[in-house]
Image: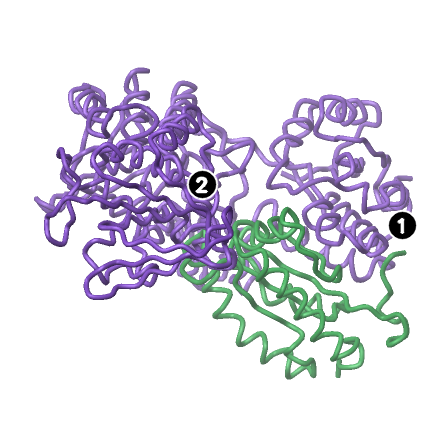
Amino acid sequence: MSTTTAESSPAVNWEPRIIAYCCNWCSYAGADLAGTSRIQYPPNARILRVNCTGRIDPEFILVALEMGADGVLVSGCHPGDCHYTSGNLKLRARWALMQKTIEQAGVDPRRVRLQWASASEAQIFADGVKELTEQVRKLGPIRSEWK
Amino acid sequence: MTEKAEPRIGVFVCHCGHNIAGVVDVAKVVESAKSLPHVVLSTDHMFMCSDAGQQLIKDRIKEQKLNRVVVASCSPRMHEPTFRRVVEDAGLNRYLFDQVNIREHVSWCHMRQPKEATDKAIDLVRMSVARAAELESLPIKSVSVTPRTLVVGGGIAGLRASLDIADRGFEAVLVERMPELGGHVRKWTHLFPADESGEQIIAPLVRQAEHHKLVRVMKDSEVVEFGGYIGNFTAKIKNHKTGMVKEVDVGTVIVATGFEPFRPFGYYEYGQHPDIITLAELQEMTPRADLIRPSDGKRVKKLAFIGCVGSREAGKLGHEHCSRHCCSAVAKAAADLRDRVDEVVIMYQDIRTYGRGHEELHRLARSKLVIYSKFPKEKKPVVQIASGRIRITWYDVLSGDNLEYEPDLLVLASAMIPPADVAETSKMFSLTRSADGFFNPEHIKLAPLTTHTAGVMIAGAAQAAKNASESVVDASGAAAKAVGLMARGNVEIESTVSHVIPELCSSCHTCVTACPYGAIAMDTKKSPPVALVTEAKCKGCGTCAASCPSSAIIMYHSTDEQILTMVEAYLCPSTQTTGGVA
């Protein structure tokens, strides 16, 4: 199997596993453009397409962390640029509370990253994946943190 | 709505020639999918989108009685519609298809890590298979198309599009912000490649549009509100002079809002001397026998042009693109004006006279002894103003000499950039923009005139820097797209809307305030009143589903289960049963 299971020993051969929720209209397209532009970035993220970041229930992030994701990236349209007018603002409103929640559960909030990347901002998308991967690599496997 | 039958999933992995297979070990991906739950078939093809690839999918659906299809290939933003059609041809509901992006998101961005890329592809396929098992068929809905097109912008593209639509018997509502139709072209004195002025080209179009009984021209007007969905849009149009707001129902829209000539403050002393002007400003000078200096009205004897001003600047956002019209426009203007001045010097970075008849203009300019001098892109000419005189010094690549020149008039061929209010236009019609600031087409090669907002087309310089002839080609194409929709009379729309389960709704109103479209209201016929979605208004963002504290809202095709099963398939594959269908 290609992935390490949550229980396997860290440090040795451990690679950060990242779930990336991307909105269809801006960031998923930005990630497409990163590919088309042959921008190279770490292969640690698995992109899940949602129509809008407004679709992202904080539960999606919590469940991912609980199942062993070492990091979660949420990438959407810039505020004011949402394909659905304001879905990204709804997500942003939930974000602070969600961060508090994971912090209280003992998880370092630096494992989750919210970024805005438009359909033309391939580099911003790729840099986001790179920075979160590096950040999570420093923090180590998530299993060490759950209380 | 529920699929009762046990899922029978077929996995089809595409090589995309060398694009995927050059990095990803396709055979390994195919093999790993075979042992996934509900997978009855896993296979590959050189080009899954080709006729042969499509036929393969159709044949296997029938032979293996597949009821779910996963294709691992390019971005769904590219070929989801193609493969949805394929599974539909084979009798499957289009929503029982899922696409895995192993090209844009894998092989192209991890080109030097074939092992990791293959692992990622395997994971993504496993996630998609898990999602496929949870997919449900949805009803295919179609709506009628109002036989009227809103054309935004009365420049050469908007005019051509309106006339094409009207000539085919459909109504066009042409909205122009300025008091006159004709846009930039109308003002231009040297319009390449023909020997006509902009006015001569545009006047007949303006006349036809204003007299055509199916074109409703609204000048001094702007779209102030826009809503609805493909086939059924409503726009509010405000007249600046009268303050009157009119509402029109349209089925399709063509955005032809054009460009703005860049005013290059900070480049070559622009703005510091009245005799340093842009190409657009030169074009707008009143034609007369002599070319005169704006500063003192004296005859221009020495005329200079500098090319690529604010264009082709790597790393400078909004100015990286080639503005495409300037090389030919400069050649045309220089050739025309050469007869009225003593000397013309053109300083250029490169010459790109690519269109039909354009190279001939370049040659004509040279044959009239217009002096072309190439400067290096890393060392642009330097303009100084000393006691009222303009002095240019630069390095000439071909002679290897440092040169200097004191022109009476310096013309800067400045970039085409989007209009100042492009962000508002983009928001109004839900259009995305490219790095150059212009609107993104649905697909750069395959769908350059349609956008990701179904029913909204783009034409002309609103899409990218381009010349008048190219804008007209766009306009006729976009008009054909609009007419195609209107002639059919109805169009299929996405069924991915949200639905409230009345029994679970706690009447908290959270979704009512969360919905950006006012698509959810309380159904007062129920007691207590519960939330109810008006499907025609729902655009499928899913914000309501994420905000419902009672989990009473299902977002079709993007349910909590369909999303979380992918997360689980990636992170905890062992908890899911393995092996094909029993």
Q: Chain B appears what colour?
A: purple
Q: Give the mark toward the camera: 2 or 1.
A: 2
Tell me what residue is drawn at x 43 percent, y 54 percent.
Answer: B318
Residue B166 location (% of width, % of height): 28, 20
Residue B102 location (% of width, % of height): 73, 46
Tell me what residue is drawn at x 21 percent, y 53 percent.
Answer: B275
**Disc 1 secondary structure class:** loop
Residue B252 falls in image quadrant = top left
Disc with the residue nearer the chain's start (2 vs 1): 2
Tell me what residue is drawn at x 57 percent, y 53 percent.
Answer: A30
Quadrant for the C terminus of chain B in the image: top right
Q: Amino acid at mark 2?
A: Thr
Residue at mark 2 to residue at mark 1: CA–CA distance: 40 Å
Do tag 2 and tag 1 residues touch (Cβ < 8 Å)?
Answer: no
Q: Which chain is green?
A: A
Residue to which mark 1 is pinned = B578
Relative vertical location of residue B539 with respect to residue A136 in this rendering, above or below? above
Residue B273 falls in image quadrant = bottom left
Q: Which mark is residue B453?
A: 2
Nearer to the camera, B221 or B400: B400
Residue B9 shown left or right of residue B232 in the figure:
right
- The answer to whether dots 2 and 1 both sit on one chain is yes
